[in-house]
Each structure stands twice: as structure tokens, then as C-alpha cells.
Amino acid sequence: MSEERDPDADARRLAAESLAEGDAVGWFERLYAESGSGDAIVPWDSGAAHPLLVEWAGDLRGEGRPALVVGAGLGDDAEYVAGLGFETVAFDVSESAVRLARERFPGSRVRYRAADLLAPPAEWERAFDLVVEIMTVQALPEELHAAAIERVASFVRPGGTLLVIAMARDEGGPVPAPPWPLTPSELAAFATGGLAAGKTEEFRDGLRHRCRATFHRP
């Protein structure tokens, strides 16, 4: 029997190569491009919307309001948000991820775009009633977290909500990079630029530690 393949191996390999070259985000494009040809596995691609998103959304109805999905990858979370009735924009830094998402969901109402979280389109500032950030900031090196958190928070319009789902670690705890799980202070930092913290929940399952938090702009 062949040994089961480590689903994180490709991401770790490509991230190490990219970071060694001084490129903090280039490995995402390489990972998605290689996944499209069958040469790599995207470890966070479960083929379904994140269960902590689905559980949180409940009976939420978008009623045509604008939503933004950060780091949308292959599109499952974006399609779920659109299915709730939101006019959904979803972006990823990887053009290959955007292409693959469009191929997976032909005729989708989601507007998939290639964009850089650290240099987003100006028209996205305070433009969305719902912003969904699932494990994107944590995929960036720690020194980029503060800037990425500020950008995510800036997308929420007055009256809007930000949902953050991430792997978590204790303050000063070990970092099994990548990813670089968020600390409590980093999670709290999303309450910036006028955003107010809502509910924060923690989920522990063996060695896995996850968090889900909401923030609101009055």
C-alpha cells in the first residue's frame, strides 16, 4: 500500500522557496497553478464551504447587499455567501485560483477577481455589508499581519459586519509556519478604524485550536 500523501507538504515546500526569494505571497500562485495540473495539493481545499461559516450564517439573508470574500481560493465560501442572497465579490492574489474558481462554478453570480489584500482596489474601502475573512491573514508571514488586518477591517461599510475565522495560538506560542496562526492580540486588532468587537468563540479539538469572531461598524 502506498504511503498517504501529506496534504500540507506542497504548501510548506512552495512557501519556503518563495520566502527564501523574498516573496511573501508568490507561493499562492505556484500552489494553485500546480494544483491545476495535478502536481500539488491545496491543503485547505475541502470542496465545501467552511463549517464554521455555515454554522454562523444560520438563517442570514443577504437581500442583495454587497459582500466580500477575502482570499477566496477555489470559491466554495464565496458561492455559499452568494447563495445566502448577497451580491458577492471574491478575490484572491492568485490568478490561477480565480481561473479555477470560475471553471468550477460556470455561470456563477460571484464576481471573482485577482487582487492583492495589501494593495486592494480603492473602491472597496467601506463598501461591503458583509466581509468574510477565513484563514487568509494567517497564511501571511507575521510581519505582514498588522497591515493585512487593517486592510480587511477597511472593507466594512457603516452598519456592516466582519466575520473572521482563523487558526489560533496563545500569545507567544510556537508558530508552525506556514500558517502563522493568530494570537489573541492579533484577533483583537481587527477592531480598528471604527470597527467594534462582537462575539469571539474558541474551538479546541486535540491539537487544533480555531477561533471565530465578529466585528461591526456602527
Image (cartoon, helix red, strand yellow):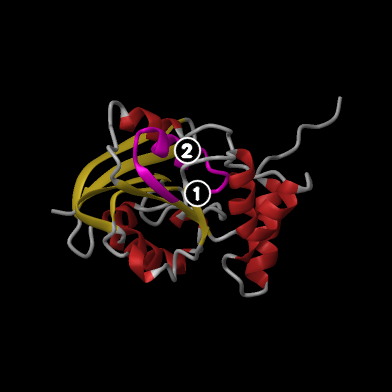
Would you say residue 212 sits in the magenta stretch?
A: no
Q: Is 4 left, or right, of 96 in this rendering?
A: right
Relative image position of residue 91 (x, y in whole percent): 48, 55
Q: Residues within 10 Å of mark 2 (few under 14, many from 20)?
A: many
The numbered mark at residue 1 is none
Q: Report whether residue 202 is seen.
A: yes
- Element at label 2: helix
In the rendered image, the quadrant that contains the N terminus is: top right
Residue in the image at 76% along x and 32% along y: 4
Q: Is residue 30 above or below residue 40?
A: below
Q: Is 81 left, or right, of 185 in this rendering?
A: right
> What residue is disc 1 on?
72
Residue in the image at 45% along x and 64% along y: 117
Would you say residue 84 sits in the magenta stretch?
A: yes
Q: Is residue 186 above or below residue 1?
A: below
CB atoms at circles 1 and 2 under 8 Å apart?
no
The image quarter containing residue 74 is top right
The image quarter containing residue 150 is bottom left
Q: Which residues are magenta?
A: 72-89
Along the viewing direction, whichever of 44 and 114 lies nearer the viewer = 114
> What residue is disc 2 on?
79
Relative image position of residue 184 (x, y in whole percent): 31, 51
Relative image position of residue 17 (x, y in whole percent): 70, 65
How far apart are the alpha carbons under marks 1 and 2? 10 Å
Relative image position of residue 58 (x, y in whole percent): 31, 27
Q: Is 1 left, or right, of 62 in this rendering?
A: right
Q: Furthest-right residue in view?
A: 1
Amino acid at dot 2: Glu
Amino acid at dot 1: Ala
Q: Furthest-left residue in view?
A: 218
Q: Report whether residue 180 is seen.
A: no
